Amino acid sequence: MERILVSACLMGRRVRFDGRAKTSDDELLARWREEGRLVPFCPEVEGGLPVPRPPAEIEGGVGGAAVLSGAARVLTAEGGDVTKAFLAGAYAALNVARSMGIRIAILKEGSPSCGSLRIYDGNFRGTAVPGQGVTAALLEAHGIAVFGEDRIGDAARRLADLESSAVPPA
Ligand code: SF4
């Protein structure tokens, strides 16, 4: 059975920076949860950050790949450098995915860790820009397909492809 890595906040865990969850009521997620497919994971908590914690953004909104290469940092609004924790969390997510043979992840859109299509621009003004978070970028660089919570239908199609062997393992 294909397992799916999922942002823990989407599964009701109160791990966000503000101490809240972002629980998804998606029916497919509920079904997959019953099937035992879902592996909840919070990169920021696993990277050592507390709950609650100051919000953080990737400087310049340049995306997770730049953080992975050392070209950009992840900063709080006060200028605190939390890059190390974000990197640690991303690699912890990759280790979990690899150890379980996971090839699909459903991650919270917009997060500096989990965002897959958009993040924020680094100015803490709520301005979204196209880009990926640190964990999403690392997972995709290693062949894991990442979908936001608003693209669960696409994840389902990917899952069906993998389970019918229509798409060879990455
Ligand atoms: Fe949710 Fe990801 Fe943020 Fe953790 S790092 S709270 S899983 S969006």
Image (cartoon, rainbow, N blue to C red):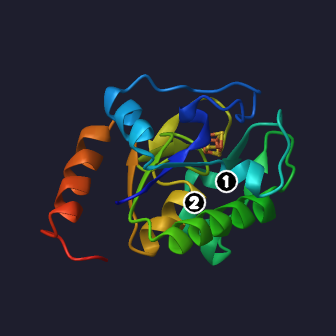
Crowd rating for badge 1 (residues with CA inside 10 Å; few <14, some 14–19, many 20+)? many
Where 40 falls versus 52 (above or below)? below
Q: Are marks 2 and 1 in contact (CB under 8 Å)?
A: yes
Q: Which mark is residue 43?
A: 1
Using residue 119 as the reference point, say whether residue 80 is left or right of it.
right
Of 168 and 47, nearer the camera is 168
The residue depicted at 67 percent of the width and 53 percent of the height is 43
Q: Amino acid at mark 2?
A: Thr
Circle 2 residue = 135
x and y percentages locating residue 97 in the rendered image: 52, 66
Q: Is mark 1 within 8 Å of ligand 1?
A: yes
The residue depicted at 24 percent of the width and 39 percent of the height is 153
Using residue 142 as the reference point, say whether residue 8 is left or right of it.
right
Picture quadrant of ligand 1: top right
Q: Amino acid at mark 1?
A: Pro
- Find the distance from the CA under tag 2 to the CA under tag 1: 7 Å
Using residue 112 as the reference point, say whether residue 51 is left or right of it.
right
Crowd rating for badge 2 (residues with CA inside 10 Å; few <14, some 14–19, many 20+)? many
The local secondary structure at tag 1 comes to helix
